[in-house]
Amino acid sequence: MNAPDRPADLIRAVAESITRRLAGEKGPAAALRSVVHMVDNDEAELAVDDLARVIEYHRIRILRTEYDQIAAAAGQLGALDSLTEVKIDRFISD
């Protein structure tokens, strides 16, 4: 199975991956559902920003592959500033 490469697909995949990992944690799960709803409403650029802020607010550790997907989506959308502003790379856990 090929990894999704559309920005919306990448953001959805990361939000769903994090949600599965954090199963049972209500705060992050609800916030991550909001990110998926943004993607569903063709708001991928806003979803990138929101996802970065959810990760920062809840101090969610992300995998390198998740970071790479977020960065790829942000790059395609011209939204890399959302990642650098939050310094999302500090939450990478290998």
Image (cartoon, helix red, strand yellow):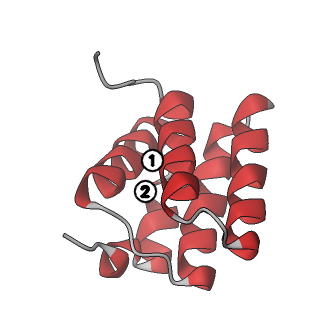
Label 1 packing within 10 angstroms: few (<14), some (14-19), many (20+): many
Label 2 packing within 10 angstroms: few (<14), some (14-19), many (20+): some
**Amino acid at pointer 2:** Leu
Q: Quadrant of the C terminus?
A: bottom left
> Badges 1 and 2: C-beta atoms under 8 Å apart?
yes
Answer left or right for 68 relative to 34: left
Q: Is residue 42 visible?
A: no
Q: Quadrant of the N terminus?
A: top left
User: x, y (%) of residue 47?
Assistant: 66, 49
Task: Residue 24: give its label.
Answer: none
Q: Nearer the viewer, residue 21 or 7?
A: 21
Q: Residue furthest front?
A: 24
Where residue 76 sits, quadrant-wise, is top left
User: x, y (%) of residue 8?
Assistant: 57, 31
Answer left or right for 86 relative to 94: right
Identify which residue is drawn at 39% across, 24% down. 4
**Amino acid at pointer 1:** Ala
**Residue with the mark numbered 2:** 80
Relative height, residue 16 to residue 84 (above, below): above
Q: Nearer the viewer, residue 65 or 87?
A: 65
Relative height, residue 44 to residue 86 (above, below): above
Identify which residue is drawn at 40% across, 79% down. 87
Identify which residue is drawn at 55% across, 66% down. 22
Identify which residue is drawn at 67% across, 73% down. 25
Mark 2 lies on a secondary structure that is helix
Where residue 62 sits, quadrant-wise, is bottom left
Marks 1 and 2 sit apart, C-alpha to C-alpha, by: 5 Å
Task: Residue 74: give its label.
Answer: 1
